[in-house]
Amino acid sequence: MDNWKTLLADLDDDYLIGIANKGIVKRAYKDKEEGKYQVLSTGESAEVSVGGERVSIRFPLGESRCSCPSRTVCRHVVLGILALREYVEAEAGKTAEDPEERRAGTDAEPGEGSGISREGTAENKKPQAVCLWEGQVDGGQPEQAEGRHSEQADGGHSEQEDRQSEQEDRQSEQAEDRQSKQESGQEKQTGVGQKGQGKEIAESVATQSVKTENRTPRKLLEEIAAYPLTSIRRILGSRRFGSIAGQIKAGQRPRIEHSGIITVSFPEQGHTVKLLSPLEYAACTCHKKDFCIHKAEAVLWCKWEAGVLKPGELGPETGEKTEYDIAQVKEAAGQMKAFLEELLDTGLARVSPDVTDYLERLAVISHNARLARFEGYWRALRDSYGNYLGRKASFRVRGLMEQISRLYKRVELLLEAEDGLQIAELAGEFRAEYVPAGDLDLIGIAIEHFENQAGYEGETVYFLEENTKEWYTYTYARPVFYEKARRRGKPEKTQAPWGVPVTLEELAQARLHLSGAKCDGRGRLSSSQETKGELTGSRKNGDRLGIGEVGGWYYKDFAALYAEQIGKKRKSWLREQEGEAERAELVFLRPQSCKKAFFSETEQKLFMSLFDGAGREVVIEVTYSKRESWGIRYLERVTEEKLPCFLGRIYMRNGRLRMYPVAAFEKGELLEDGWPE
């Protein structure tokens, strides 16, 4: 008895709906009013007679069984659980009665007693429903007299009625989901629940924790805390698991409600999960019987809410993103090593003109083996040999030897790799996973044309987020590795994404608000149709950029520039020139003075020295190409009297701080006076 009292202490209607459904629970309450139920025993497995059916109540309650044809938790089981709860509560209430009555009650069997009604009194002349522990119906008629009739009536229609209840419950759930989506849409329109939630996460977690302690059964909380993180990661997959961190950062959280169960609603996905003890009996509106991704995600969010998880534990694990055929990778690495050794043995002077074809073939082999970075390495090496064979002035033997040396070392590491984790660390990814970034207020800063090692060219637009001062980029790329050289670099007017009615060039000067933005870990924005953009301003209309809006990316002191951008971000020799920064980060450089730019005919490069107030130097360096010719001519015309503010990438080479310029802001284009520095 005491055991059942403890087990049923936290039972409420939400729990019953979780193991059955809302329709069945309503039907059970309706049947309860007729009073056709009797608690027969309260052992380890309690026995209850319900309308001529025999119900065996077990714990977990979802494992209870009924003699009717229904194969799920039917209305008889739910009514049996309600009857058992009523019985144990009434027995507990007897402890406050007269000791002699208590002793008399103790000697009686569960089927004998004094006729206690739902109200807990024995003196009601016409009780609405009597709990038949004594085995009699309202007027004292033996239950057995109508037992067969009840069995025939109930047993024949039980399964059909339960199915009807389930159908009604599904319709009710769908209506609730539609209402939840509408509420979510209203939150987006008013800005509530998205951007504002990010600032209130700590307060919300504290509030929910209070609810958890007061209303949610401790056993359920313990099961959620103990649920293995590895199992959740396996169910969700590494990318979806890691996307939770992006949602937390963006302030996007599901709705979590606490009662006898925990209800987690995902309005964006259109699903609701009900977590109950044991977790195997959790229910989801996707109606999958196994532990689906929605249930796993609900457990993960509850772990986060309870403070069980830390943000660092939510990152995707390297190597789980891509499945590698290790034998294929080893074979590809063997071919790479053999060809590099052949190149070194042959020497540069005797190299065959068709070497570029062999290098392209190795790039294709790398692609087929899913070695994304190696595909880029081989195409970069092909371009270097192409520059040598074409007798271009920009070719340098030292640069070629550095490329070959780094690539040979990487190939050796690939041959030594023992599992997918080590291969993934070297191979990189073809396409990163985009995760929710919430709503963003972006300032277009600059646009840059590019041609990368993998044989793609296009434009990259750089943005600063107004609130966080973080860099974001949008890239439009097109393959050109099979096009003729004369067609490469041809500018194209491209329409901006997100439904914004401007070109990419105009987007680089615009201010816009993105709703439902997605980005990868390097701040690269997705052009997903789910993301909607709205123009809020443009520098073309006099909405100028001020240094107060660019945060800590504006430098006058070159010593601070070195300490913050170089000293803390040094790369190993092997990772140099990979072209893969964690996040594209540019700096605004305001020099105090400069030397006139000069072009080196031997190196085919333009050099220009910039100085800060203390005489510290940063060298602008631009290698000649048809694409860079306009920028070189502009830099050659720059004078100290009209010295612009430069935007570009900072790096170290040969012990000197250097910059590759992306854009230049002339006087009046950047508000530098009157802003706090």
Image (spheres, helix red, strand yellow):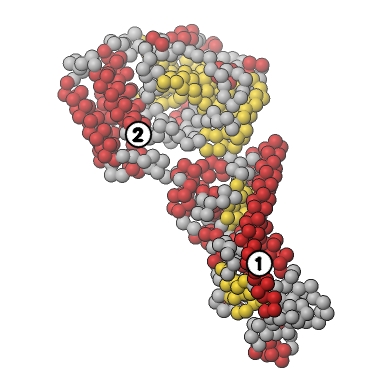
| Location of the N terminus (image quadrant) | bottom right
Mark 1, other Cα within 10 Å: few <14 / some 14–19 / many ≥20: some
Q: Please, is residue 576 above or below residue 224 in the view?
A: above
Residue type beneath disc 2 = Arg
Is residue 644 visible in this depiction of the protein? no
Q: How many marks?
A: 2
Is residue 280 visible in this depiction of the protein? yes
Q: Position of residue 572 (x, y in %)?
A: 34, 34
- Whichever of callouts 2 and 1 sits on the residue coming sooner in the sequence is 1
Secondary element at tag 2: loop
Q: Position of residue 540 (x, y in %)?
A: 63, 16
Name the quadrant containing residue 380.
top left
Residue 154 numbered mark, or none: 1
| Location of the C terminus (image quadrant) | top right
Image-based side of 333 in relation to 518, left or right? left
Q: Please, is residue 435 above or below residue 45 in the view?
A: above
Q: Residue at x 60, y 55 (%)?
A: 274
Q: Nearer the viewer, mark 2 or mark 1?
A: 1
Residue tagged 2? 370
Image-based side of 544 in relation to 649, left or right? right
Q: Nearer the viewer, residue 51 or 285?
A: 51
Q: Position of residue 240 (x, y in %)?
A: 49, 43
Q: Residue at x 71, y 69 (%)?
A: 32
Which residue is situated farthest in the right direction here? 125
Mark 2, other Cα within 10 Å: few <14 / some 14–19 / many ≥20: many
Name the quadrant containing residue 71.
bottom right
Q: Nearer the viewer, residue 566 or 390?
A: 390
Q: Position of residue 418 (x, y in %)?
A: 28, 44
Which residue is situated farthest in the left direction here? 345
Image-based side of 257 in relation to 658, left or right? right
Distance, label 2 to label 1, CA atoms, is 62 Å
Secondary element at tag 1: helix
